């Protein structure tokens, strides 16, 4: 029978619950079990698609086109398996579902209330779309004690009673601060946050303690005594210099054994298959080479806004035993710079990436970056908006269309990039126009691109003739410029299967200039780097 693990966070936010959950998934997988990972976010947005990356970090996109919390990216990277639309829910979606049912008369005149209707919807989500996985791990967003998280926790409490406590494990991730002046760790915040859980009828079975240091045995005993757990179920989660070392750290702390012990599954579990995590821990830090990639972006200083991109570059670093340094270049600053300043800023980068983005702010700076890379033969990877700015740049400077632009940024222009109004999804036509709602209506999820034989794109993807990558965009290059661009040495090397939507452009005479309408970073994994990032790092190493 499926076992359920719920992971809550205490004391403060940003403790790394997502990475902790993902690492637990990886641990259980290494013991031979199948794992599904899910996220429940109590906030009231229906999904994170329209939330600012400043506040919420990157929007992660699944194969089946859900715009989700970035933690789903961690789950995929740590376990190697793809998440689904049904693996993520927000408080807003729960309310939306309940209110939709109310409007449709499904409650047959009953007074619709938080309990039971909202909590029933929480329970429905917990049980939905499962396929006999050994473990389903649910991360609860926010911090215990947050008002909006209450109904989720109440739903979990009820669910535990329904499926039996033996089938449910609660892990509480908490902060155990190390106080330098006293040279000791403090357990009080943990005691208090567990007390908050107890008030809601939930008693954690394992307490995972984030701390600068390993938690000394005495403090473990103290936490155990105050929080009703065994000392061996108080687990240290010390800081590491790289997230991919965490599964090995948890394993050393016997977290997998303790989880399996709780469910009486120790005897049927495999010997831990930990080879790959040990190997990766050895590569990290023992770099043979060093390169710098300039990322020209709007949200510099907010690396969470580009989480999957950073990780994909880290994966390419792992596969090439190379330390990949990132130089963040603010696209708005670039707009103000003269040619000498621009030359200076790019003087120490081996390659340039212009990542995805929305809105007109900083776009002219990104166009300058694409132009600089093209003219100076610097490896360039354009991602989504990074492809669109490259096309605008080429239209302006190679085709002489001075006012070339995207209708996203300017209505009075020659639109080389415009709203994609029609496309095929699973054999059906999707149609959009200017008035379509902003949430969840982009061209989202995995789509096939057909690759031009012998192109750079096809070489990068190991000679493939078609690939599937994840998309998240509303605008699209106008294919009518294909021949004109070709005459100037720019080739469309990837297209949608119907040939209507350009997916990849490249410049065959350039060292490495490739720009893609999709987001290759979403599918990159530490043990299976996305080909485009691997190729970028490889070309940068050929200095
Ligand atoms: N803003 C552009 C569009 O909607 C690019 C989106 C992106 O980079 N993800 O098409």
Image (spheres, helix red, strand yellow):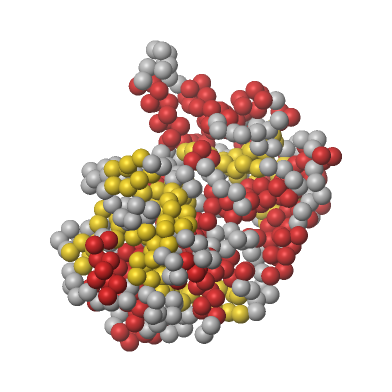
Q: Answer above or below: position of 483 versus 166.
A: below
Horizontally, residue 503 falls left or right of residue 243, namely: left
Residue toward you, 444 or 423: 423
Question: From the viewer's perspective, is 307 left or right of 256?
Answer: left
- Outermost residue to the bottom: 340
**At 60% across and 40% down in the image, what residue appears?**
138
Q: Name the residue at the top extreme.
A: 109
Q: Position of residue 257 (x, y in %)?
A: 79, 45
Q: Can you say which quadrant of the picture contains the N terminus?
A: top right
Q: Position of residue 446 (x, y in %)?
A: 45, 50
Image vertical order of residue 180 relative to residue 162, above or below: below
Q: Nearer the viewer, residue 119 or 515?
A: 515
Look at 53% across and 62% down and name the residue there: 530
Percent position of residue 42, x then y? 49, 38
Which residue is pictured at 77% across the width and 53% down the height?
273
Asked whether residue 184 appears in the rendered view, the answer is no
Can residue 38 be seen in this snapshot?
Answer: yes
Nearest to the observer: residue 475 or residue 253 = 475
């Amino acid at each position: 029978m499926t076992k359920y693990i719920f992971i809550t966070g205490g004391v403060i936010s940003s403790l790394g619950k997502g990475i902790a959950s993902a690492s637990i998934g990886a641990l259980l997988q290494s013991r031979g079990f199948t794992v599904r990972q899910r996220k429940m976010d109590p906030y009231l947005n229906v999904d994170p698609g329209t939330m600012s990356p400043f506040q919420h970090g990157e929007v992660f996109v699944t194969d089946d086109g859900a715009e989700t919390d970035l933690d789903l990216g961690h789950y995929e990277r740590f376990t190697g398996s793809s998440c689904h639309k049904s693996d993520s829910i927000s408080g807003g979606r729960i309310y939306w579902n309940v209110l939709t049912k109310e409007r449709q008369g499904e409650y047959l005149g009953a007074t619709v209330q938080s309990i039971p209707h909202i909590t029933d919807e929480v329970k429905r989500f917990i049980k939905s779309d499962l396929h006999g996985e050994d473990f389903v791990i649910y991360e609860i967003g926010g911090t215990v004690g947050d008002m909006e998280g209450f109904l989720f926790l109440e739903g979990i409490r009820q669910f535990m009673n329904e499926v039996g406590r033996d089938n449910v494990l609660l892990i509480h991730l908490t902060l155990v601060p190390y106080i330098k002046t006293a040279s000791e760790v403090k357990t009080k915040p943990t005691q208090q946050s567990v007390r908050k859980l107890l008030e809601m009828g939930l008693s954690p079975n394992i307490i995972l303690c984030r701390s600068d240091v390993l938690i000394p045995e005495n403090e473990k005993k103290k936490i155990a005594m105050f929080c009703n757990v065994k000392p061996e179920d108080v687990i240290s989660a010390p800081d590491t210099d790289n997230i991919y070392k965490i599964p090995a750290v948890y394993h050393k702390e016997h977290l997998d054994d303790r989880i399996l012990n709780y469910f009486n599954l120790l005897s049927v579990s495999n010997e831990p298959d930990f080879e790959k995590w040990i190997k990766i821990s050895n590569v990290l830090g023992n770099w043979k080479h060093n390169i710098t990639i300039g990322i020209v972006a709007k949200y510099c200083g907010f690396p969470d806004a580009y989480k999957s991109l950073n990780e994909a570059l880290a994966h390419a670093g792992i596969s090439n035993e190379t330390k990949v340094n990132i130089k963040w270049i603010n696209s708005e600053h670039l707009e103000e710079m003269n040619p000498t300043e621009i030359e200076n800023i790019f003087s120490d980068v081996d390659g340039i990436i212009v990542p995805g983005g929305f809105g007109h702010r900083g776009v002219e700076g990104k166009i300058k970056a694409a132009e600089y890379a093209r003219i100076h033969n610097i490896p360039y990877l354009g991602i989504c908006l990074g492809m669109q700015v490259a096309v605008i740049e080429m239209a302006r400077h190679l085709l002489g269309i001075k006012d070339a632009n995207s209708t996203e940024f300017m209505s009075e222009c020659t639109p080389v990039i415009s709203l994609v109004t029609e496309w095929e999804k699973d054999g059906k036509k999707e149609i959009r126009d200017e008035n379509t709602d902003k949430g969840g209506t982009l061209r989202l999820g995995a789509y096939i691109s057909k690759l031009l034989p012998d192109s750079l794109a096809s070489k990068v993807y190991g000679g493939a003739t078609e690939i599937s990558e994840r998309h998240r965009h509303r605008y699209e290059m106008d294919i009518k410029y294909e021949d004109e661009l070709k005459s100037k040495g720019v080739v469309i090397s990837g297209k949608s299967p119907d040939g209507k939507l350009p997916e990849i452009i490249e410049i065959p005479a350039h060292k490495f200039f490739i720009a893609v309408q999709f987001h290759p970073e979403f599918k990159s994994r530490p043990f299976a780097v996305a080909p485009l990032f691997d190729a970028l790092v490889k070309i940068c190493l050929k200095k």
